[in-house]
Image (spheres, grey):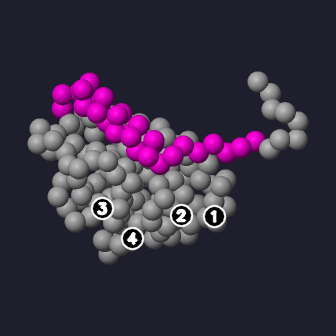
Amino acid sequence: MSRPPGRKQENHKISRELFVLTYGALVAQLCKDYEKDEDVNICLDRMGYGIGIRLIDDFLARSAVKKCRSYSETADMIAQVAFKMYLGVTASVSCSSAAGNEFSLILDKNPLVDFVEELPAERASLCYCNLLCGVIRGALEMVHLAAEVTFLQDRLKGDAVTEIGITFLRKAEDRKHKRNK
């Protein structure tokens, strides 16, 4: 169908509740499809990776951010701008290495678990929100930043906060040195 002339195209947004419930249904189906939690975790990470490699284009176009000059700036951009834009929350950032390539994103509130009380005992090793790790890893890879992204703490597992660890795999000096050659 075509749009009537003179009418602006509307940005369609789904409600947060619908998204969270749909995500919960997805995880529940994956748990039925796979016996091992590790297989579910891998599948969620892969799905997130696929989303991340596409989402970065939308993020760069909509946010109009400038190029990050350091890993610290990149981590702050993810925590303050990207999380706010796509999840409606911000995360705090802490650097956990002297080399400056390891960061923790700490979420006081994780909107993906709004309707989840706790994980079943038989699913204790499930990383319910592992999709987020894949999204971050995929987006970073598309801007040429190889990273390892994992959950370090999870409220669903009894921790005080949800913490996502990001380890950038190349040192900043290596990247500068390669450009100068």
Q: CA distance from mark 1 to mark 2?
A: 9 Å
* Nearer to me, 39 or 118: 118
Of marks 1 and 3, the one in the foreground: 3
Q: Quadrant of residue 119?
A: top left
Mark 4 highlights which residue?
Answer: 93
Instruction: Give coordinates of residue 150: x percent, y percent.
Output: 30, 53
Instruction: Give coordinates of residue 90: x percent, y percent.
Output: 45, 65
Q: Residue at x 40, y 59 (%)?
A: 168
Q: Residue at x 64, y 66 (%)?
A: 66
Mark 2 highlights which residue?
Answer: 81
Q: Are marks 1 and 2 in contact (CB under 8 Å)?
A: yes
Q: Residue at x 51, y 46 (%)?
A: 15
Span colored in magenta: 9-36
Within 10 Å of disc 1 (Cα), the crowding (few <14, some 14-19, many 20+) is few
Within 10 Å of disc 3 (Cα), the crowding (few <14, some 14-19, many 20+) is many
Mark 3 highlights which residue?
Answer: 163
